[in-house]
Amino acid sequence: MQQSGSAAGWIEMSIKRFCSESTENSLKNGSRERAWGEPIVGFSKGDDPLYLQISENIGPFYLTPMNAFNRVFPDVKTSPDALTVISWILPQTSETKRDHRKERTYPSERWARSRLFGEDFNSKLRREVVMTLKNSGFNSVAPVETPFWSLQTSDRYGLCSNWSERHAAYVSGLGTFGLCDGLITPVGKAIRSGSVIAQITVEPTIRPYTDHHQYCLFFTSGKCGKCIRRCPAGAVTEKGHDKVKCYAYLQETLKYVKNSFGIETYACGLCQTGVPCESIIPTDNGKRITEADAAKQPEVS
């Protein structure tokens, strides 16, 4: 059995190795380009108070780590403090971001492929982490890969899933939310995320923030809002993200993606590129980045 004292490094290495070596990390285009760059990994305790706060805030259907673990292992005696949430961020490649940055209405082909084949790989990564842990004697579950993962309606926030990969990443010290609800991480907002809950003890990642909007320039300075102009559906305003408009527009992209690229998926994500937080955290200790730093980021008129 793997010793839990070295679990953080072992788990992170396993995730990075799988992303680096697996042929499934591919856009499945002519040149078999990688879908994702090198991931970053974070950890949080199953009894972190934020999980209960999130559940109480979203609604009673939202799962805490203990709730999700018990669904799969009802006969295993454990406690929230004996659980660890393993979270990772998969960054879009520079080529995908470059192509997508040019678009104004519909997704680029690379972005659409990352939405379909890249998320297929993310599912394989979740299952790989679960299997790796199992082989070392640790029970674990990837909530998004289970039959009980679902979309439901929150009285406060509307359409919500009962386990959020982005919220797990937030609790695990990997990023904070932007105006468009995207997660701004050390590798930017053009990302996807995944998570696994394991019955293992791992030192939690230190959260370098105290507010859930700390990395967003709109909230820290009120001087950005570029994601508003990037949204073709008008779903992002100074009031935040309208998930109903966003979801409706995603359905509209299905026909375009199929006719243009020959694959069946919805995709948008325009608000994740052509913005200062595309590839970095555009803040320094909660303050606005310098003009020199901002100038290095892609500008969209």
Image (cartoon, helix red, strand yellow):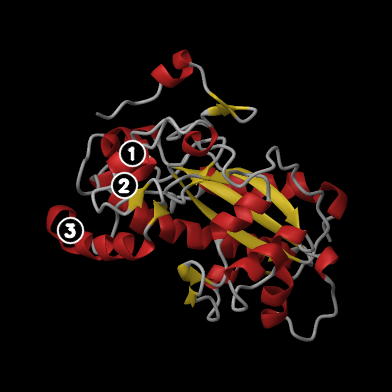
Instruction: Residue 191: tell me if it is visible.
Output: yes
Instruction: Work out how far the residue at label 3 is from the one at label 1, CA to CA, in angstroms.
Output: 18 Å
Q: Earlier in the sequence, mark 2 or mark 3?
A: 2
Disc 2 marks a residue whose amino acid type is Trp
For residue 47, side relative to residue 280 (left or right): right
Residue 291 drawn at (x, y percent): 45, 15
Residue 211 drawn at (x, y percent): 64, 44
Check disc 2 and report its element: helix, strand or loop: helix
Q: Quadrant of residue 215?
A: top right
Q: Residue at x 74, y 70 (%)?
A: 139
Q: Residue at x 55, y 76 (%)?
A: 146
Up the image or down, 76 lies above or below 273; here it is below
Instruction: Work out how far the residue at label 1 is from the one at label 2, CA to CA, in angstroms.
Output: 6 Å
Q: Quadrant of residue 228?
A: top left
Give the foreground label among 2 and 3. Answer: 2
Instruction: Work out how far the residue at label 2 is from the one at label 3, CA to CA, in angstroms.
Output: 14 Å
Residue 153 drawn at (x, y percent): 47, 76
Disc 3 marks a residue whose amino acid type is Gly
Residue found at the far left of this picture: 259
In the picture, the quarter occupied by the N terminus is bottom right
Residue named by callout 3: 262
Residue named by callout 2: 111
